[in-house]
Amino acid sequence: MENPITSKCCNHQPWFVLLVFFVFCIELFSFDYSGLTAKKSALVTVLDDNHGNVINTQSSFSHDFTEITNASVSPLPKTDEMGDLKVGTEIDSCVGRYIFVHDLPSRFNEDLINNCRLLTRGTDKNMCPYLDNLGFGPEIENPEDVLMNNSWFLTNQFLLEVIFHSKMKSYECLTNDSSIASAIYVPFYAGLDMSLYLWGFNTTVRDSASLGLVKWLSEKPEWKRMWGRDHFLVAGRIAWDFRRQSDNETDWGSKLRFLPESKNMSMLSIESSSWNNDYAIPYPTCFHPSKDSEIFQWQDRMRRQNRQYLFSFAGAPRPEYQNSIRGKIIDQCLASKSQCKLLDCNYGATNCDNPVNVMKVFQSSIFCLQPPGDSYTRRSIFDSILAGCIPVFFHPGTAYAQYIWHLPKNYTAYSVYLPVKDLSEWKINLNETLLRTPEDKILRLREEVIKLIPRVVYASSRSRSETLEDAFDLAVKGILDRIESVRVMIREGKDPSIGFADGNDYKYTFSTYGNGNGS
C-alpha cells in the first residue's frame, strides 16, 4: 500500500522542482545585486575621500564656515586656468593685515586743512604752519646742538589725526578691495572739526559733522559686514572731548562717541576714556626720524648725556583745579635748588613752545616729573622718554592705564610711581625720595627708557624702517588684534557687542594693573 504522503509528493514532483529552482534564482540574484551595490558604495566612498562627501558638506557647511579664519580677510590661494592650486605659490605677508581706507567726502578731512586759519577760533594761534610736512610742521632749523638736524620739527600735539592719515597712505598692506580687509580706517579729522566750533557754537553745530559721518558710513556696504566693529578712526584730542553726555550748551565737546553707530567703532586718540572702545596711542613729539640709523644715533647720544639735575618739571600750576598737585611739585622743586630744574610753562610763557628748551632740560635730568594736567595725560611723558629721562608718575591714568600697546606692562622697569591721586594725599618729599634710588637701578631704568624711544615716535614716511616698529606700526598692530578678537567672538557664536563699548569705571584704578611686575 502506498504511503499517502509519499504518493502525494511524487505526484507533484515537477512543480516542487520548479519551485526550488525559482527560490534558488531569487537568492542568486539578490546576492549579485548586493555585491554590485557594495562595489558602487565603495566607489562613492573613494570619491568622497578625495573630493569631500556631498551630503556631509551640505549638513556642516555653516559650521565649517564659522570655524575657518575669516574668509573675508584671507584671499583665496592662487589657481591656474583649470582651477588647480599653483605649485610654489608665495604666502601673502599682508593676509590678516590688509586695511581699507574709506574715501570720505572732503568736508570730513581735506576741507578742514584748507580752512586751517579757522581751526583755533577764539585764540591768536595760527595752525596753518603746523600742517606743513604732512602734519609734522616746519623743520627746526637751529637745534643748538640739542637736537639732530633734519629729524626734528615743530609738531603740534593735536595733529595726530593728520599725521596718522599721512602715514597710512604709505602703509604696506593697503587694499582697494574691502572684502579682504581686516580693518576699515575712517580718516575723519574729528579733533580739527571740533576746533572749529569749541567756542560760541551750540551743540547742534558741534555735532553736525559727527552725525553726517555716521550717516555716510552706515549706508556703505563695508558697514554691514560687521556693523562697524571692524572700523576705527584716529583723533588728535583726548577721547573725553568726544563724549559730551548731555545737550546742554554749556557742556564741553561733541557727542560723537555716544552716537549709536560710533559705539560700534574703535577710536585711537592721545588719551583714552574709560570706555572699552577707546584706545590711547602716543602724543606726536617733535622727533620724526626718516631711517633707523637716526634713532640709533639719538639713543647713543642719550646714553652718554651728562645729567646734572636729580629731577625736573616742565609745566605750570593748575590753581583752578582744587586737587592738583602741580603747585606742590613746583614748590618742592624750587626748595630743592640745584637738585631740580623748573621750566616755567605758565600761561603767557613761551618757554615750553620751543622743543629745544624742553629737551635741554630733560636731557640734563635723571628724573622727569609727570603729574596729571588738564587731563590725565600730557605730551611731556614722551618728550622725557626721548630725552632718556626716567618718568615719575603720580596717577595710573597718566600712562599705565593708557598706552597699553606702546609701554611695558611692567611699569617698574622704566618708571617710578609715587601714588598721589590728589593734594590731600601728599606725604612725600621728592628730593629725599628720589635720592634714595640706587645708582644701578637708575642705570637700568634709563636704559629701558632709551629702548622705548622707537616705540613712541612717528617716523617719517619718506622711508620705511626695516628693523624697528614706531608708534604708528604698534597702533596698527594693536587695532588689528582688537578687531580680530571681535571676529573670534563671532566665529564662536558669541554676541560681539558684549563688552565692546562698555564703560569701565575701574580703568584708572591702580589695582587693575597688577603690582608692577607684569602680573
Image: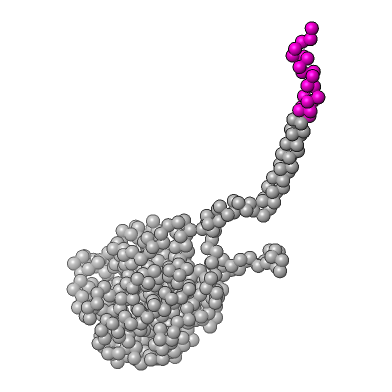
- In the rendered view, does 203 fall on the left or right side of 473? left
Quadrant of the rendered image containing residue 421:
bottom left
The answer to whether one can see residue 22 in this image is yes
Colour option used: one colour
> Which region of the structure is painted magenta?
1-21
| Residue 134 among magenta residues | no
Which quadrant does the N terminus fall into?
A: top right
Quadrant of the rendered image containing residue 153:
bottom left
Residue drawn 65% across the image and 67% down it: 78
Residue 471: % across, % down: 45, 73
Viewer-proximal residue, 116 or 474? 116
- In the rendered view, does 50 fall on the left or right side of 182? right
The answer to whether one can see residue 386 in this image is no
Quadrant of the rendered image containing residue 13:
top right
Secondary structure mostly taken by the magenta-highlighted segment of the chain: helix
- In the rendered view, does 351 fall on the left or right side of 405? left
Residue 248: % across, % down: 22, 78
Residue drawn 36% across the image and 84% down it: 192
Seen as rendered, the residue at the extreme top is 1
Q: Is residue 17 above or below residue 118?
A: above
| Residue 15 among magenta residues | yes
Residue drawn 53% across the image and 57% down it: 62
Residue drawn 45% across the image and 70% down it: 224
Viewer-proximal residue, 56 or 64? 56
Viewer-proximal residue, 423 or 194? 194
Q: Is residue 1 above or below residue 512?
A: above
Residue 114: % across, % down: 41, 91
Viewer-proximal residue, 46 or 360? 46
